[in-house]
Amino acid sequence: MDEEEARDFNERCVQCSEVNWGLTDGGRFYCRTCHNVTERSRDVVNTEVTCNARIQTISKGSRNRGKSEEGWEWYVCEGFQLILKKQAEALEALGVCPQMKDEILCNFWRRYLQKSQQAYCDRPASEAVKALSVCDSSTDMDSEPDRPSLLHLLSLSESDGDLQTDCSFASSSGKVSECTSVCSGSVDGRLYLMKNQKETLRMSMPMTLSFCYMALLWLREPMTLSDLLRFVVEGHIPYLNVYQDFPEKMKLYGLDLRIFCVESWPVYEEVYSKMIELAAFLDLPHFPDITESCFLHPDMLCMKYLMEVNLPDELHNWTCRVVKKIGFGEVDFLTFTPGNKSTRTVKYDVLAAAIIVVVLKLLFLLDDHYEWLLSGFAAERNKNNKEGGPYFEFKEWYKVIKCSLDAEQKKLDEERAKYLWRCEKPLFYSVKKKSKVLRRRQMVVNLQNQFCKLSGSVQPAERPNPSSFQLSWSEENTDGTCFHGHSLKGILQQKNGVLTTINPDYWLCTIRLCREKLCGHLAHYKEVDFPQSYHFVLRLFSFLLRIQPSYIHEEVCVIEHKLFNKKLSKKPK
C-alpha cells in the first residue's frame, strides 16, 4: 500500500530532480536517491470516526525516551546546534546581517554534520550508535507539543523547502539503551569523548565561536575576532554557562559537562586556528573579496584604532603609505582562501594594530630617548604657537593613555576575579530531586546576599551596552585629553615634495625571522629585551584586542622585514 502511494507522488525532488519516492514512518515522502525529506505527507482515510473525513498526519509518534520518562534522548550535536542558534540570534541583535543565521551559519553547520558523518548521510556501520539513513526529525506540534524538533531550531524560515532537508538521528531500539549511560545525559556523550577523530574535526565550545567568526568573515561584517570574543566576555553573546538555556527535559550531567561546561575565557589563537581548520575541513570555496571599502581592510581598521587610542588623525596617511608599500592592502593578500597553505592567513585586527606600531616607530623611534626629546621640542613650540592646532606631544599622550589604560585594566581584572563560574540555573536530573535542588540553591543565594550586606560589598554593575570602542575621546573636551586634531609638523620635514621623518634611523625588533616549523612563531618577545615605550604601545593594543603582546610583536616583525626587505637582503661589503 505504501509503495503504491509513493508511486502516485510524481513531483521531482528539489535536491536531485529525481522521481523516486518512499514513505517514512511518520507518513512523509522521502527521496530514495538523495534522502531528502519533504513537507508533503500522504493522505490517510480514517473510517472509524467519519467515513468521509480525511486527515493529514505528519507525526511519527512519541519519541523514544530513556531515563524512565525523565528526559529526552538527545545527541551532543543537538546541544551544539542549540548553542549556535542562540549565538546567531545574539549577533543579529547586535546588528549583524539577518542572512547570517539561516543562509550562512545554517549551511556551514549542515555541511559540518555531513562531513563528520553525523547527519545528512548514511551512518558508517562501525559507529556504536546507529542512525537511520532516512528519518523524520520534525514532529507534529499537536501530537507531541512538549518536544520541539531540535535539528530545525537553527532555521527561521520553516516554509523554505531547502532548509527543511533533514536526515536526523533516529536510534534503533536495540542500540539506544546500550549507549544511554548513567555517565551522561546525552545518548552519545560517552562515545563522543572516547572515539578517535583524527580524520574529522571534533566539535567543542570554542569551535562554536569559530563557526560564528567564519560566518561573519564570509559576510564581511564590521566585527573582528577580537570584537567577537570581547562581546562574549561582556555577556552579549551566549558562551559561558549557555547550557542552562537547554530545554528542561534535555538532561545534562556527567560527561556532558566536560563537553558543554566552560570554565575559562575564549582564547583568540584557539578560536582562530580552529576556524582555519574548520574552513579547510568543510572544503569551503574562496571567501568574498576584502576590498578597500570593506571594514576589515587595514586602512579602515587603522582609522578605527587610531581614533580609539587617541592618536593624531594625520597618522592615518602614514599607515596607508605603509600598507601600500608592503602590499598588505591587496585583495589577494587579504581574502581568505581555505586550504591554501601557500598563502599566509590574515588576522585583520592584529595586522592593523601592528601597522600602527610600525608607524609610531618610524616617527618616534620608541627607544626610550628620541620620543621624549621630540616631546620637549613640541612643548616649546606649543608655548609660542598661537595659530593653528597644537603640536603632538608623545609625553602628554603617554600620560593620558596610561592613566586611562591602568583604570580600564584594573576594572577588567576585578570583573574577571569576581566572576562566578557556577551556573545560575541549578541542574537537576529527576523530578523527585527538583524541589530539593531549588531549595538548596535559594539558600545559597540568601546567604550570599546576607554576606554582601554585612561586608558592604558593592552589587555587581549592570552589563554595559555593546560598543565597538572601549576607549572614547571627544574633541569637544577642553581638558586637552583628546589628541585627534594635533599636528605632526614638529617631527616631519619636506623632502622632494614629500613629507618625511626628521630622524632617518630605525631599529628592527629582530634581524631574522624564525623559520623553525616546530616553533610555530616567526619572532619571540621578552619585555626586558625591548624599550619600555615600545612595550607600552604593545600593551595598549594587547588590552584592546585581548591578546598577548607577543602576537602583535610577531606581526610587527613581519611588517618590518617586508618594509625593509631590500636593505636586509643586501650583502655586506
Image (cartoon, rainbow, N blue to C red):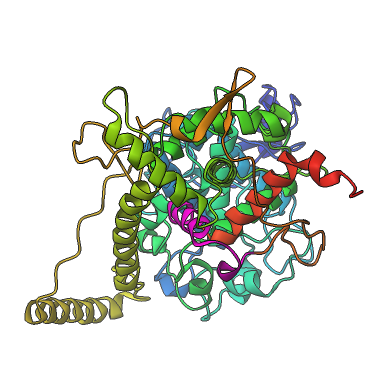
What segment is highlighted magenta in the picture?
A: 525-546
Which of the pair 346/62 is nearer the observer?
346
Q: Is residue 256 visible?
A: yes
Q: Quadrant of the N terminus?
A: top right
Queried whether the magenta region covers residue 545, the answer comes back as yes
Residue 22 against residue 421 in the figure, above or below: above
Which of the pair 289/476 is nearer the observer?
476
Q: Residue at x 44, y 35 (%)?
A: 304
Which of the pair 262/529 is nearer the observer?
529
Residue 185 against residue 316 in the figure, above or below: below
Residue 179 against residue 230 in the figure, above or below: below
Residue 370 as seen in the image, left or right of residue 278: left
Q: Residue at x 66, y 56 (%)?
A: 509
Q: How many marks?
A: 0
Residue 392 against residue 151 in the figure, above or below: above
Image coordinates of residue 174 in percent, x first then y, are 65, 70
Image coordinates of residue 219 in percent, x first then y, are 55, 31
Q: Is residue 228 visible?
A: no
Which of the pair 523/131 is nearer the observer?
523
Image coordinates of residue 284 in percent, x first then y, are 72, 39
Image coordinates of residue 376 in percent, x first then y, are 39, 46
- Which SS type dominates the magenta stretch? helix
Residue 42 as seen in the image, left or right of residue 130: left
Tell me which corner region of the image, top left, top right, bottom left or bottom right, holds residue 423: bottom left
Residue 357 as seen in the image, left or right of residue 112: left
Q: Residue at x 38, y 41 (%)?
A: 308
